[in-house]
Amino acid sequence: MSELDRIDGVLAYCREAVVSTDPVAREELVASILSCRKVFIYGSGRSGLVGQLFAVRLVQLGLDVHFVGEMTTPIIGKEDLTLLISYTGKTSSVVQTARIAKRIGSRIVCVTGVVDSPLACTSDVVVSMKVPEGDDVKKVAPLGTVFEDSAILLFDGIISEIMERRCITEEEMRSRHAIWV
């Protein structure tokens, strides 16, 4: 299998996963981002890295965003959104964060691959992706690669949607980009 075939495979699996998301749940995520006071994002491992990437883009849009667990992260409040990312929806630190934020009164949105997971059951909104599985998938995208790459694509689409709704230009985002300051 050539490198191009592998890339095409990953792209096809990611497209399938992103397209499987419920448009209503996706819209609820966007509406929650646009209506909250602060956005708190958390995921563990590579899902956490995906969350950090999304957090950076949201900051560049001018939103008040924090990654849970950082030393400078303030306490989550009732008017805040907590966005949690976990393929299995069973990662203990992510589920525990959901439970704590829910108890505080934060709106909980999760992005997951398992719609009936403990994380999904704790969340107000579940953005679920049907991630392709099987030996063919594992050959080009082992472990949670398809979920993580698909989540990045989903979030990038949300960024452009928020840009459009808020009439934010790339130039405005660049002014909040650490490298360009």
Image (cartoon, rainbow, N blue to C red):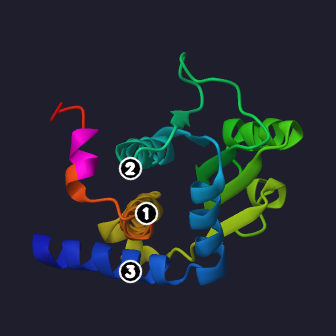
Q: Foreground residue, 27 or 141? A: 27
Mark 3 vs mark 1, foreground winner is: 1
CA distance separating discs 3 and 1: 26 Å
Quarter location, residue 115: bottom right
- Mark 1 Cα shell of 10 Å, populated few (<14), some (14-19), many (≥20): few
Residue type at tag 2: Leu
Any magenta on residue 92? Answer: no
Q: Are marks 3 and 2 in contact (CB under 8 Å)?
A: no
Residue 55's image quarter?
Answer: top left
What kind of residue is marked 3? Arg
* Span colored in magenta: 172-176
> Residue 149: x and y, percent?
38, 62
Q: Nearer the viewer, residue 139 or 75?
A: 75
Which quadrant does the N terminus fall into?
Answer: bottom left
Q: Which mark is residue 69?
A: none
Q: Position of residue 87 (x, y in %)?
A: 58, 58
Q: Which mark is residue 166?
A: 1
